Amino acid sequence: MGIFDRLGRIIRANLNSLVNQAEDPEKILEQTVLDMQEDLIKLRQAVAQAIATQKRTERQCSQAQTNAEEWYRRAELALQKGDEALAREALSRRKAFSDTAQALQTQIDQQSSIVAKLKENMRTLESKLSEAKTKKDMYIARARSAQASQRLNEMLGNVGTRDAMAAFERMEDKVLRMEAQAEAVAELNVGSDLDRRFKALESNSNVDADLAALKAQLAGTSPMANLPAGQKQAADAAIDADLAELRSHLEEAG
């Protein structure tokens, strides 16, 4: 294959590709219907013209037949009057009109055939135009649906399904880690709270022990130990009140 043949094929392929890309189904269908409508208008005009020509020829043929009949009547009149030469002339005129009428009748027959064919073509084109209009609406709807689907698929393709799913998986892992950290912090907070509570109990126990020891010490070394029972009870009550006040201060300080 020569270089020029290859170049020619490449050029034709590129041209065909450009034409295919430039073809809008909706516009092409609309234009096709418009062209068919224009053809139908032209065909109707041709039919009307053919019918008008046929009618004119029929009138001419009828007039020629009428003239032939008139000259035949005149030939009879001339012959009745004994003027044979005038009768011959009248018959000659009659023949001319008869020949004209016959020729016109031949044209009428031909024109009738043409008109019938044109009418048949017109009816066929009308039927095809009606069918084309119905198909045009259907194909335009299908073309629009196909274009919408194509745009949607292109959008989905541009989004990148794999990247989107990977992003969702990363976010899922991150959320799981955040939830685990929140649970860990909550557990630590619970542990710290328990520690504080136990420390508070231990602190109260130490205070109670110190108070008990102090109370015992005071009770053992106090000069009121040898007092009578009534006075001793009063003194113990006073001491208990002081201890209660002291304990309250210690608890507040703790």
Image (cartoon, rainbow, N blue to C red):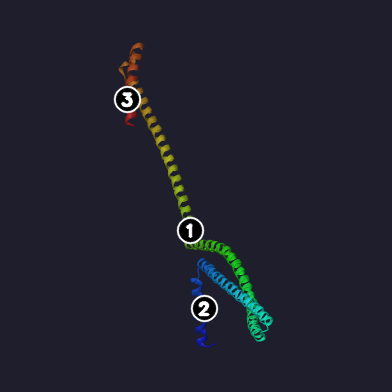
Query: Which quadrant would residue 82 be assigned to in this image?
Result: bottom right
Q: Residue at x 30, y 17 (%)?
A: 223
Residue ID for mark 3: 246
Q: Earlier in the sequence, mark 2 or mark 3?
A: 2
Q: In what quadrant of the picture does the C terminus appear?
A: top left
Q: Nearer the viewer, residue 133 or 16?
A: 133
Q: How far apart are marks 2 and 3 (CA)?
A: 107 Å
Disc 3 marks a residue whose amino acid type is: Leu
Is residue 230 shown above or below 174? above
Residue ID for mark 2: 13
Cβ atoms under marks 1 and 3 closer than 8 Å: no
Q: Nearer the viewer, mark 1 or mark 3?
A: 1
Disc 2 marks a residue whose amino acid type is: Ala
Is residue 8 shown above or below 207? below
Q: How far apart are marks 1 and 3 (CA)?
A: 70 Å
Whole-percent x, y for residue 6 in the image: 52, 84
Query: Which quadrant would residue 139 be assigned to in this image?
Result: bottom right
Secondary structure under badge 2? helix
* Label 3 crowd (10 A; few <14 / some 14-19 / many >=20): few
Whole-percent x, y for residue 173 in the image: 47, 53
Residue ID for mark 1: 164
Q: Earlier in the sequence, mark 1 or mark 3?
A: 1
Q: Residue at x 48, y 71 (%)?
A: 22
Q: Which of marks 2 and 1 is in front?
A: 2
Residue at the far front in the pictured view: 81
* Label 1 crowd (10 A; few <14 / some 14-19 / many >=20): few
Q: How far apart are marks 2 and 1 (CA)?
A: 39 Å
